[in-house]
Image: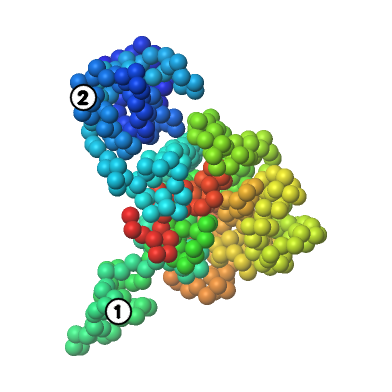
């Protein structure tokens, strides 16, 4: 007897096989003709497997007719062609064993429809719903595609630290890591008689902390990834990142996943080329490997979901300088909520106008004002702009941010001081410019942001398994 997933059991090729299927009951319907229909799902696919349980089963009255949504079962039987519409097979049960019951009085997924807000309060159970099962499978497809793409392109996968002493973005919105008890901080250390005071640049309190210095949860693995790119050529890091921004919006999370490639001997044009190939690979894989789930999103969440991905795949990404984009926006005649001025960062409404109305295609903006970008981006010869790039797509706006990195030590030091950073605090990063510096570039892609674009889901908290946001860290 073959053990099959629901996905495999729904294939016509399996008809006639004796199989064992395991999963959770979605529904049960009893027929007056002396049998019951069970809908079983195990998470392997969007659709359910219909099971026909005959009244002749030994436990039909005692157990089968008591099954409700949420119960887990192991079913043995024969797959046969289904006379029902929309399904190739059904399972004629020879035995139905109950693994676990679900109390109908308290199981929260009795109704077929629940608000996404409610489902966030039961994040441990929401993967059992159609929507969040589909999100999980598409997320898995995206992550698989990310690794395949970079491995095939000759990149080295590097694990960068989650605990860091460096602020990559210079924004200061970082979670502090400490072993000190804030309700009972230790007294300052008393130096031993005859010893000279230590020359630590940090307040005395940090000498008693675990790392003897201020440390934080990382906002990016970029700086550490650069060290490997400047030694081994091309690498990427893929892991969780953290931002302590007090933002309760549909686009912000306190914990999210980032993939960040870094490439030695790449300039900005190389960076753009890679980003375009990368996104097209992800979207193409999703359409090919997750067709059933994408059809669900098209029908239930966003009717344009599939067509939008196809449009991106068929489009050439338009490359426009920030200065040109500002001119387009100012000449558009649109009444934007946020004013458009050179030197200000563009907002989502501006980015969406460029992609959805003006160019009608994905757009890569480049050469942003130096005043709105971090210290590590290469300064252009005009002294006003840096070699930054943002990849914009319809519906979402920015989906990738990157740049050519500043490889000149004197310019890097000046940019750090300009942004109030002490170059000595980045001594190891500066060493990359002192010993065999090279032109190099990289970018970052937020996995949750790309999932919003792919699925059409409206809230970023609904495309990550356990969302972390202000006041939300229960699970």
Q: Residue furthest top?
A: 16
Q: Is residue 469 above or below residue 145?
A: below
Classify residue 123 as left or right of residue 101: right
Q: Nearer the viewer, residue 1 or 350?
A: 1
Describe the element under mark 2 as helix, strand or loop: loop
Classify residue 27 as left or right of residue 248: left
> Where is residue 460 drawn, in percent x and y?
50, 52
**Which quarter of the rendered picture does the C terminus lie within?**
bottom left
> Where is residue 350 drawn, in percent x and y?
69, 58
* Mark 2 crowd level (few <14, some 14–19, many ≥20, 10 Å Cα): some
Q: Nearer the viewer, residue 351 or 187?
A: 351
* Mark 1 crowd level (few <14, some 14–19, many ≥20, 10 Å Cα): some
Classify residue 279 as left or right of residue 429: right
Q: CA distance from mark 1 to mark 2?
A: 68 Å
Q: Residue furthest bottom?
A: 193
Which residue is disc 2 drawn over? 59
Q: Is residue 264 above or below residue 91?
A: below
Query: What residue is at 67 percent from the left and 53 percent from the top?
Result: 352
**Which quarter of the rendered picture does the N terminus lie within?**
top left
Query: What residue is at 52 percent from the left and 35 percent from the top?
Result: 296
Describe the element under mark 1 as helix, strand or loop: helix
Q: Is residue 346 above or below residue 185?
A: above
Mark 1 or 2, nearer chain start: 2
Q: Nearer the viewer, residue 410 or 74?
A: 74
> Where is residue 264 drawn, in percent x and y?
53, 49
Which residue is disc 1 drawn over? 205
Residue 299 visible in the shown view = yes
- Determine which of the numbered discs, if any, sits on residue 376 in the image: none
Q: Is residue 325 above or below residue 75?
A: below
Q: Quadrant of residue 426?
A: bottom left
């Amino acid at each position: 007897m073959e053990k099959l997933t629901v996905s495999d059991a729904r294939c016509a090729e399996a008809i006639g096989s004796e199989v064992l299927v395991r999963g959770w009951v979605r529904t049960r319907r009893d027929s007056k003709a002396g049998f019951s229909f069970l809908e079983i799902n195990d998470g392997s696919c969007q659709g359910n497997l219909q099971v026909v349980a005959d009244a002749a089963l030994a436990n039909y009255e005692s157990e089968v007719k008591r099954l409700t949504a949420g119960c887990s079962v192991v079913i043995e039987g024969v797959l046969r062609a289904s006379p029902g519409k929309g399904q190739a097979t059904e399972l004629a049960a020879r035995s139905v064993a109950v693994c676990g019951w679900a109390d109908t009085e308290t199981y929260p997924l009795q109704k077929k429809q629940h608000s996404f807000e409610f489902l966030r309060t039961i994040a441990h159970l929401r993967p059992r719903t159609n929507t969040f099962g589909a999100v999980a499978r598409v997320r898995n497809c995206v992550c698989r595609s990310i690794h395949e793409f970079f491995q095939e392109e000759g990149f080295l996968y590097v694990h960068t630290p989650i605990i860091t002493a460096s602020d990559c973005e210079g924004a200061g919105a970082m979670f502090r890591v400490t072993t000190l008890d804030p309700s009972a901080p230790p007294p300052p250390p008393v130096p031993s008689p005859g010893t000279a005071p230590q020359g630590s640049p940090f307040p005395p309190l940090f000498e008693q902390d675990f790392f003897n210095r201020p440390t934080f949860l990382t906002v990016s693995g970029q700086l550490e990834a650069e060290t490997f790119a400047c030694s081994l050529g091309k690498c990427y890091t893929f892991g969780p990142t953290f931002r302590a921004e007090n933002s309760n919006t549909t686009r912000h999370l306190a914990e999210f996943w980032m993939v960040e490639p870094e490439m030695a001997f790449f300039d900005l044009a190389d960076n753009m080329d890679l980003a375009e190939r990368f996104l097209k690979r992800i979207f193409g894989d999703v359409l090919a490997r997750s067709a059933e789930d994408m059809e669900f999103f098209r029908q239930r969440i966003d009717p344009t979901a599939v067509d939008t991905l196809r449009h991106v795949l068929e489009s050439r990404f338009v490359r426009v300088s920030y200065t040109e984009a500002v001119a387009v926006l100012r000449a558009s005649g649109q009444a934007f909520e946020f004013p458009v001025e050179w030197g200000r960062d563009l907002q989502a409404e501006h980015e969406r106008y460029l992609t959805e109305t003006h160019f009608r295609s994905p757009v890569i903006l480049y050469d942003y004002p130096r005043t709105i970008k971090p210290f590590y981006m290469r300064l252009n010869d005009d002294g006003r702009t840096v070699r930054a790039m943002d990849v914009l797509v319809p519906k979402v706006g920015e989906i990738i941010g990157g740049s050519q990195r500043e490889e000149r030590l004197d310019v890097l030091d000046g940019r750090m001081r300009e942004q109030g950073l002490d170059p000595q605090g980045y001594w190891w990063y500066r060493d990359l410019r002192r010993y065999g510096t090279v032109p190099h570039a990289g970018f970052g892609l937020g996995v949750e942001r790309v999932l919003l674009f792919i699925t059409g889901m409206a809230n970023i908290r609904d495309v990550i398994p356990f969302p972390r946001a202000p006041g939300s860290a229960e699970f």
